Image (cartoon, grey):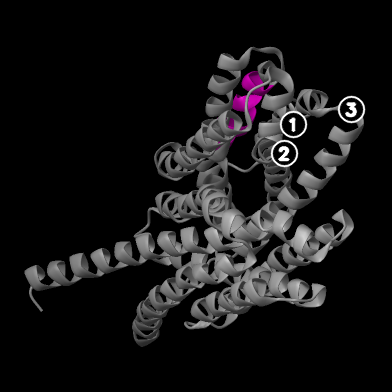
Amino acid sequence: MTNAATAKETNAQAGAAFAVLYALSLCHMLNDTIQSLLPALYPVLRVNYALSFTQIGIIHFAYQVTASILQPAIGLSTDRRPRHRLLAGGMFASLLGLLLLASAHTYWLLLVAAISVGLGSAIFHPGASRLARAASGGRFGFAQSVFQVGGNAGSALGPLLAAYVVLPLGQPSIAWFSALALLAMVILWKVGNWAREQHLRAAARKTPVDADPPAKGAVAALVILAILVFSKQVYMVSLSSYYTFYLIESFGVTIRFSQIMLFVYLLASALGTLLGGPIGDRIGRKAVIWVSILGALPFTLLLPHVDLFWTGVLSVVIGLVMSSAFPAIVVFAQELMPGRIGLIAGIFFGFAFGMSGIGAAALGALADIWGIARVYQICAVLPAIGLLTLYLPREPHLRTP
């Protein structure tokens, strides 16, 4: 084969890989749009079934636990044996969950529907994150950012769809969103074809994939990264879950205005996610983690003490800065354990998901006791945990010699 032909084939493969990466980001958006519809349906379910807040909490717990706890196991399973149709199968579980939510007439069916949606999310995140790395062309941070920003977009889009479709039209309208799951299934089936071809090509060359041993001190570093994720997720969930209540209570704004400000914050978070990975590729993941977590501290400390205008400005800065951490954290952790890409993705996506749920519940309980304003004063110090970044290993020495 001539050099020109080889170069042409290489470029074609790179183009196909980036197409897969953007397809995974789109499916991440569709997946997170679907999963964000469930909480939006709670007011409708409470009226339709005369549910208590405890029963609503059990539904959310069933969904949250399924989505978070299963992810590491699924990630480890795909590390050991790639399953190229698993992602499409996971989206089928989400499809069944949506159809059950639309048609359920008993509380137990609602629980099964929530578990089904959670199962779809648990299957999607570690496997899709693993394929995003495979399609990165060596730009691991960039690939993780592109993949994750799809999820940010879905989380922001879901509440808007719920407000304009689900709440006015009621529970049966959830069935319409099964079209999103069907579209994702078709895309993920094609992505599975690409993954299978890559696997067969690597097997023919007898090329080991991610065969390097774990880095020295990997377990301690992973614990530090998990603590950093805890500080980031709990603070950010204080904004995503209670920001509207804070604005209404502190400044007397309308519900619509508070929702617009929340949407602006979510957009800033999506932009930060998109930027965090590529910047980490250039200057190093550890530097991005330093800036994105500890660097947010001055802004979080100021937020509870400023007027409405500066609250909006600071929330945008905080969202932009703090959200850039997660792509860098995931890639850093994957480089610590290069043979366990899916497992690491499952652990960190699952842990982040779980911390968001636990954090939202805990902060809500504190808000009932002390008020929303006091909760933001307490949460303001969480980014100081970013000082632990000092104890992460230097990136050139991640892998053992």
Q: Residue at x 63, y 78 (%)?
A: 77
**Of helix, strand and loop, which mostly describes the magenta segment?**
helix
At x 67%, y 58%, the residue is: 41
Which residue type carries mark 1?
Answer: Leu
- Dividing the image into 4 quarters, which one contains the N terminus? bottom left
| Residue to which mark 1 is pinned | 382
User: Which amino acid lies under the numbered mark 3 shown in the image of this protein?
Assistant: Trp
Circle 2/circle 1 CB separation < 8 Å? yes
Q: Nearer the viewer, residue 86 or 309?
A: 309
Q: Is residue 104 above or below residue 280?
A: below
Say which residue label 2 marks: 231
Depth order, front residue of 180/382: 180
Q: Would residue 252 be visible to someone looking at this image?
A: yes
Find disc 3 in the rendering and name its residue.
Answer: 370
Q: Residue at x 92, y 32 (%)?
A: 369
Mark 2 or 1, nearer chain start: 2
Question: Is 139 located above or below residue 280 in the figure?
Answer: below
- Magenta range is 289-300
